[in-house]
Amino acid sequence: MRSAGLAAQALVLAGDLIVLSLASAALVGPKVAWSTVAPPAPPGAGAGEAAAVAAAAMAGLYAFKLLGLYRLERLDRFADQIVALLLGSGVAAVLLLAVDRWLARSGGWPGDRVAVWFVMVALGTLLVRRMWAQEIAGWRRAGRFARRVAVVGTGEAGGGVLDRLAARGPAAIQIVGVFADGTGTPPAAVRGQPVLGSLDELPRHLREHSVDDVIVALPWASGPDLRAAIEAACRLPVDVWLLPDPRDVPSGAVATLRFAGLPMLHVARRPLVGWNAVTKRAEDLLLAGGLLLLTAPLMALIALAIVVTDRGPVFFKQERFGFKNRVIRVWKFRTMYADRSDPSGGLRTVRGDPRVTPLGRWLRRFSLDELPQLFNVLRGEMSVVGPRAHAVAMRVGHVPYDQLIAEYAARHRVLPGMTGWAQVNGLRGEIDTPEKARRRVEYDLAYIDNWSMLLDLNIIARTAMIIFKDENAY
């Protein structure tokens, strides 16, 4: 659902951008471009004119966004877009005149020239959106925008939610199944929907299947069970909704949103969705691609040095937890003797570890062993910045990481990163105490909850500054 929705929004945005660009190019282009539709352009078209139309084009796109013209639910309803498109085009035309006068050009553009620009933008966007509305309506009928929903709760409340979801039709809502709260013996099915297991089974199901939303439909009087269900769902990369119990919540006492026609409390949102996800992926592709080009000669020299000094395999592959707790294979330059490597990650690397080769010690000191992870980034398995990927057998003392810290799984709501917020705040190296483990998870979750491109750039800059003096890299 999310990928199809982003594709539809991107196509409509691209159409708007093309229309605005063509109209703006005509406005500042050669006189012949206007000879058949408007009086000749005034002499001296240049940087000032280009700045004015660029500002107008950006203002048009921003006005369309503010008017809700890129909301997925409106893209296939052309009639609902007409007034907003005309209004947004008008806002852009007014701004074009204002910026043109502010730049104090000699004479400025005549009003009729800007009026023609407005007509081109308005008609062009109407035609493009009419075309896309028909196409996107077909996508919706085919169920490409359907939200995949799991329901927690097998009682009366859960049954009522399932009825309302089913009434929306498979083109809008696809029910993936029901999960029990863990108390008592659950039924085999509720309202014809299979009970897939207890709440503990939800993370495993999410790893294997796509789920967009989890609705917790338990009585508020259930207390600890309700709290446990909410906490478990909030650790997953999904939108979490809580069904208010009208018997326990006075009318109007809690602000609610509507989901499938039902009043709901939106407890948690999936991080990095929509255009934030597109921005993050574009950032990863640009950074990883650029770094690979810059470091390719160095990586070739490192590979040659490993072969010459140790005559073993160049790369070391290790299974680690990725997005949704899925296991990914992470690539590194091999830094340990071939017969002493630990692919499981169960044995911690300690300072002065005898398993590390002399060359490997130098590579680890400057984090050069991690350069092959750029390929993991390009494959979409990792990000340049994010919570660090941990080995599947990683332990704190003798206790698995996920058993020691309840919130551990929440760090897998985004792709793991080559560097992260915890690392640039001094939390790198051996994790040998529960306190260190908790602090790292706290920093990881803070990064997820406060993500922005500026935060990523800050982390990258700080990583570059500390990479040559980090005493915890060994």
Image: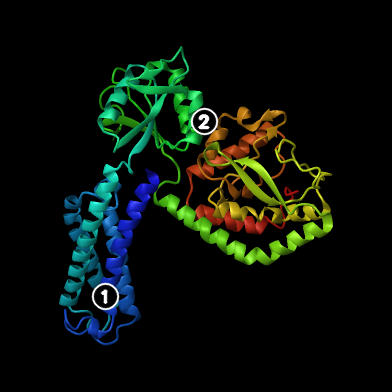
Q: Earlier in the sequence, mark 2 or mark 1?
A: 1
Front residue (pair 102, 85): 85
Residue drawn at 67 percent across, 31 percent down: 434
Amino acid type of the residue tagged 1 in the rendering: Asp
Residue assigned mark 1: 100
How far, Cα to Cα, is label 2 from label 1?
Answer: 59 Å
SS state under label 2: helix
Identify the residue at horizontal 27%, vertical 67% (top origin).
19
**Residue 209 percent coordinates (x, y):** 46, 35
Q: Quadrant of residue 327?
A: top right
- The image position of residue 319, as x and y in percent, is 64, 41
The residue mark sitting in front, 2 or 1, is: 2
Count neighbours of disc 2 (C-alpha within 10 A) and say few if under 14, some if 14 to 19, many if 20 or more: few
| Lateral position of residue 31 relative to residue 457, left or right | left
Q: Measured along the vertical axis of the image, is residue 439 above or below residue 275? A: above
Residue 366 drawn at (x, y percent):
72, 56
For label 2, the residue is 204
Identify the residue at horizontal 20%, vertical 55% (top origin).
Answer: 84
Q: Quadrant of the N terminus?
A: top left
